[in-house]
Image (cartoon, rainbow, N blue to C red):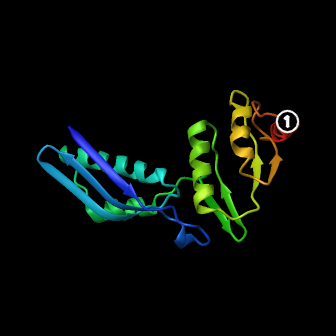
Amino acid sequence: PKRCSRSAGPAPICDRPESCRPKMHYYRCEHGQRNRELPDIQLGLLGKHQAANGAVALATCDCLREQGVPFEEEHLRRGLERVSSSARIQVLRWNPTVVLDTAHNDASIEALLNVIRSSFPQRPRRLVFATTRGKDVTGMLRRLIQHFDQIVCTRYLSNPRSVPSGELCRKARRLAAD
């Protein structure tokens, strides 16, 4: 059986680009007689959850390597360092800090909140929120509302499933009052 593990360092406090990126202290994979370690891997994406995603990517590369697909260690490192994912905890601006995220379910909202709490502890925080019908609007707002000092409700202009901003505001106000 193949067993892989990773260790992520503490979440950095983000006040400039170079202070933000998490680091995997090690990646270790044991498979039969073969063991592989890759120490000190810098990740290009924010969030401790990205260390787990990085370990999955490296384990996948190890499996491909076993099938004869060559990978240079330096290329793997560079890929993890340079990877980006638009609108997934993406810092658009540093002063003031503006983070764009398209969280739309419990797991993605929890990942966003973990990064905000650990890497961006400064206040005040403002949330610009829009969503579509079919999502757990009340659940999402309930989780988000306590972590922001102000919420601006808006809507998607060209999406027919967009929830009207007035409806979002009413829900947010109700939840804030509870």
Residue 113 in percent (x, y) is at 62, 50
| Residue 32 seen from this side | yes
Residue 120 in percent (x, y) is at 63, 62
Figure quadrant of the N terminus = top left
Residue 89 to residue 175: above or below: below
In percent of the image, x 52 and y 55: which residue is there?
A: 47
Figure quadrant of the C terminus = top right
Q: Nearer the viewer, residue 25 or 86?
A: 25
Q: Is residue 94 left or right of residue 79?
A: right
In percent of the image, x 60 and y 72: which residue is there?
A: 16
- Image-quadrant location for residue 51: bottom left
Q: Nearer the viewer, residue 175 or 108?
A: 175
Q: Residues within 10 Å of mark 1 (few under 14, many from 20)?
A: few
* Residue bearing the label numbered 1: 174
Q: Residue furthest left?
A: 33
| Residue 88 seen from this side | no
Q: Residue furthest top?
A: 134
Residue 102 in percent (x, y) is at 64, 45
| Element on which disc 1 rests | helix
Residue 160 to residue 121: above or below: above
Q: What number of labels is visible?
A: 1
In percent of the image, x 14 and y 50: which residue is there?
A: 34
Residue 95 to residue 49: above or below: below
Residue 114 in percent (x, y) is at 58, 51
Q: Amino acid at mark 1?
A: Arg
- Image-quadrant location for residue 124: bottom right
